[in-house]
């Protein structure tokens, strides 16, 4: 009998990335039903999420191939479940309070949860990001984003 533990291909990061990829693919299918202009931003963001997820899967698999023990999902359940919960909460928030307000809240909260602690830069980055989104899509492209159940007519 051998004392070698059976190696897994993926650890917690890889499985989390696979879940994010699956969710992004499902949302991309839904976003593809939108008009070309309205679906441009969601599809671009989802394609980037799929690409970043694939990169994380590859990095996790390579880490294991080098002989490093992958982190176990049971050792970091909050990390994986937290990522899924934040995405689900953001999607629900867009439906309830609208895109801009949900994004204004989500960007700094997600950055904070994943360890970024510089409050000034969080606020500045969030303001710039929201401002650019509003300027590009609402002012230049004249596209409306969901206003949410609370603020809808």
Image (cartoon, helix red, strand yellow):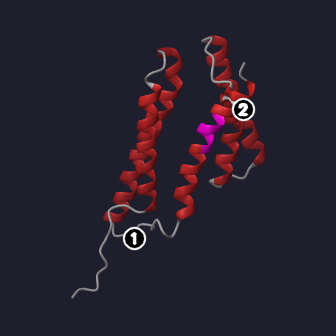
Query: Does the magenta segment cover residue 90?
Result: yes
Q: Position of residue 108 (x, y in %)?
A: 70, 43
Q: Position of residue 49 (x, y in %)?
A: 47, 39
Q: Vertically, is 101 above or below 113?
A: above
Q: Which residue is located at x 34 percent, y 58 percent?
A: 62
The residue indicated by pointer 2 is 101
Q: Secondary structure at mark 2?
A: helix
Q: Position of residue 100 (x, y in %)?
A: 69, 29
Range of magenta residues? 89-94
Query: Does the magenta segment cover residue 23?
Result: no
The residue indicated by pointer 1 is 69
Q: Secondary structure at mark 1?
A: loop
Question: Furthest residue to the bottom?
Answer: 1
**Considering the image in quadrants, where does the C terminus appear?**
top right
Q: Nearer the viewer, mark 1 or mark 2?
A: 2
Of label 1 and label 2, which has the lower sequence position? 1
User: Which label is found at residue 6?
Assistant: none
Q: Position of residue 89 (x, y in %)?
A: 62, 44
Q: Are marks 1 and 2 in contact (CB under 8 Å)?
A: no
Q: Which residue is located at x 74 percent, y 49 percent?
A: 118
Q: Vertically, is 109 above or below 37?
A: below
């Amino acid at each position: 009998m051998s004392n070698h533990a059976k190696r897994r291909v993926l650890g917690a990061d890889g499985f989390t990335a696979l879940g994010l990829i699956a969710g992004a693919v499902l949302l991309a299918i839904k976003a593809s039903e939108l008009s070309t202009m309205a679906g441009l931003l969601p599809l671009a963001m989802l394609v980037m999420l799929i690409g970043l997820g694939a990169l994380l899967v590859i990095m996790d698999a390579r880490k294991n191939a080098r002989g490093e023990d992958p982190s176990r999902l049971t050792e970091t359940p909050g990390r994986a479940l937290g990522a899924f919960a934040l995405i689900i909460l953001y999607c629900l928030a867009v439906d309830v309070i609208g895109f801009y307000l949900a994004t204004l809240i989500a960007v700094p909260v997600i950055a904070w949860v994943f360890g970024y602690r510089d409050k000034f830069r969080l606020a500045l980055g969030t303001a710039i990001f929201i401002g650019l989104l509003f300027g590009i899509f609402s002012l230049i492209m004249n596209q409306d984003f969901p206003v949410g159940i609370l603020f809808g007519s």
